[in-house]
Amino acid sequence: MGIFSSNEKRRAWLELAKEVERVGVDHIPCSQSPDLFYPDTMDGKGAAYYVKIAKRACQQCPLLLQCGTYAMEFNEEYGVWGGLSPIDRKALRRRPNA
């Protein structure tokens, strides 16, 4: 989890949940098909295909930035968050700050 305590992560998660409630769960793609956003257990092309679909669905989400920020900040290892796959997040973490 890095330098953050579990309380900080819990607080951030609750803030994200409040935003979901404010926007309405019906407008959040991952709430409609949660398994689609966690294809990490699939092998080969199947997982890549579902990651692509999930990333595309994220583009329609009103919480795209908040979700992606949460995943980056708290080093989420699995799933598509804010339009970013685990591979995308790993690559972003490796980039030098501009």
Image (tube, grey):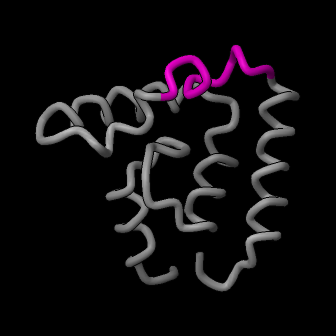
The x and y percentages for residue 79 are: 44, 46
Residue at the left extreme of this rendering: 44
Picture quadrant where residue 90 is located: bottom left
Segment colored magenta: 24-34
Q: Nearer the viewer, residue 13 or 89?
A: 13
Picture quadrant where residue 43 is located: top left
The x and y percentages for residue 68 are: 58, 51
Residue 78 position (above or below residue 45): below
Left-right relation of 83 to 22: left
Residue under the point 32% across and 45% down? 40
Q: Nearer the viewer, residue 22 or 97?
A: 22
The x and y percentages for residue 76 are: 52, 60
Whether residue 6 appears in magenta in the rendering, the answer is: no
Residue under the point 74% across and 71% down? 6
Left-right relation of 43 to 2: left
Residue 36 position (above or below residue 89): above
Residue under the point 52% across and 45% down? 81
Left-right relation of 43 to 19: left
Q: Nearer the viewer, residue 72 or 4?
A: 4
Residue under the point 44% across and 73% down? 93
- The quadrant of the picture occupied by the N terminus is bottom right
Main SS, magenta region, reads helix
